[in-house]
Image (tube, grey):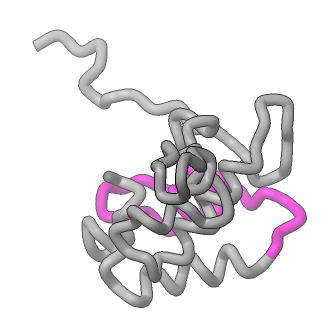
């Protein structure tokens, strides 16, 4: 995924400095959106996958995890209050949990300054072979 890349590697999330850069951005509220394209590009040349909006997703409403039957029929148990950490590949990935919490709080009619969407297309789209 392009969003995991940083300016040096295809998977910047495996590097402590990559994770720290993202956490630093999350920890500083911004009143206004910064200029698009002002951030450093990742190794794929894509700008602003981090540091402009909280997260780029195809379905903000797909954040609910399915419940399991851990508490005698309580199917809602794993859906809230950090239940997603149960199946997480990296329970120390605080940035991922921040994004999950933010997405989970959204409704279709909400608007906030750092909520956005990205349009993209394949560079070869429309070209004849």
Task: Report the residue at 78% width, 36% height from top.
Answer: 107
- Residue 51 in magenta stretch: yes
The quadrant in which residue 100 appears is: bottom right
Per the picture, the main secondary structure of the magenta-coloured stretch is: loop
Tell me: residue 119, above or below residue 29: above
> Quadrant where the C terminus lies?
top left
Magenta residues, start to end: 29-56
The image shows residue 6 at horizontal and vertical percentages of: 38, 70
Examine the rendering and report whether any part of residue 33 can be seen: yes
Q: Is residue 129 left or right of residue 46?
A: left
Q: Nearer the viewer, residue 41 or 51?
A: 51
Residue 41 picture location, percent across and down = 44, 63
Instruction: Name, please, the residue furthest toward the left.
Output: 129
Would residue 7 be seen by someone viewing this image from the given angle?
A: no
Vertical order, 31 against 8 (above or below): above
State the residue at coordinates (85%, 41%).
111
């Amino acid at each position: 995924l392009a969003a995991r890349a940083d300016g040096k590697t295809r998977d910047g999330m495996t590097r402590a400095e990559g994770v720290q850069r993202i956490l630093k951005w999350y920890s500083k509220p911004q009143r206004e959106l910064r200029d698009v394209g002002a951030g450093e590009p990742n190794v794929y040349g894509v700008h602003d996958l981090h540091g402009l909006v909280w997260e780029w997703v195809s379905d903000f409403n797909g954040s609910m995890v399915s419940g399991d039957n851990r508490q005698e029929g309580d199917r809602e148990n794993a859906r809230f209050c950090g239940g997603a950490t149960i199946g997480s590949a990296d329970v120390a990935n605080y940035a991922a949990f921040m994004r999950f919490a933010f997405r989970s709080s959204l409704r279709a009619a909400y608007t906030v300054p750092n909520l956005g969407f990205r349009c993209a297309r394949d560079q070869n789209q429309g070209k004849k072979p």
